[in-house]
Image (tube, rainbow, N blue to C red):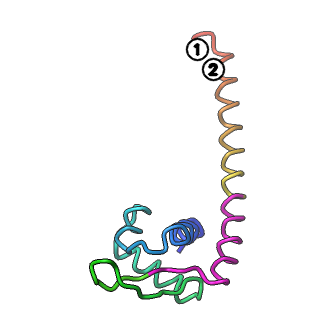
Amino acid sequence: MTDDLHYRVLKHLETHPEATQRDLAKALGISLGSTNFCVRAVIDQGWVKVQNFRRSDNKLAYAYLLTPQGIEAKTRITARFLQRKRAEYEALKAEIEQLAEEVGSNPNG
């Protein structure tokens, strides 16, 4: 699982602990099978624990709760994610500036 996917899974589960795996799959734009794999991975790493609860229609459901290790992992992953996004931004900004110069120097542009 990539840092980006770890980040997105942990962020969604932190803000929506009662989300179903189907909800999570839809939010992340990945298949239900991939979602199940991701959820199992963060549980196996000790970053998320699962609690059972009953929904109002008396069906058993789950709540995905970040553990202290999960919160620490999310913080580390978020810092790396932010660093990567800033680098992407700077590269894109430089590319835009270069393209703008090319268009500005082109008499037909």
Q: Residues within 10 Å of mark 1 (few under 14, many from 20)?
A: few
Determine which of the numbered discs, if any, sits on residue 109 in the image.
1
Q: Residue 61 in the image: state x and y as whole percent.
A: 36, 82
Using residue 66 as the reference point, say whether residue 94 is left or right of it.
Answer: right
Whole-number angstrom distance, CA of label 2 to CA of label 1: 5 Å
Residue, disc 2: 103
Pointer 2 or 1: first along the chain: 2
Q: Amino acid at mark 1?
A: Gly
Tell me which segment is drawn in magenta. Answer: 63-82
Mark 1, secondary structure of its residue: loop
Q: Quadrant of residue 35?
A: bottom left
Query: x, y percentage for residue 10?
Result: 56, 72
Vertical comparison of 56 with 8: above or below: below
Q: Foreground: 46 or 37?
A: 46
Q: Is residue 7 above or below residue 57?
A: above
Report which quarter residue 109 is drawn in: top right
Which type of secondary structure does the marked residue at label 2 adopt?
Answer: helix
Q: Position of residue 24 (x, y in %)?
A: 41, 68
Query: In the rendering, which numbered label is found on residue 61?
Result: none
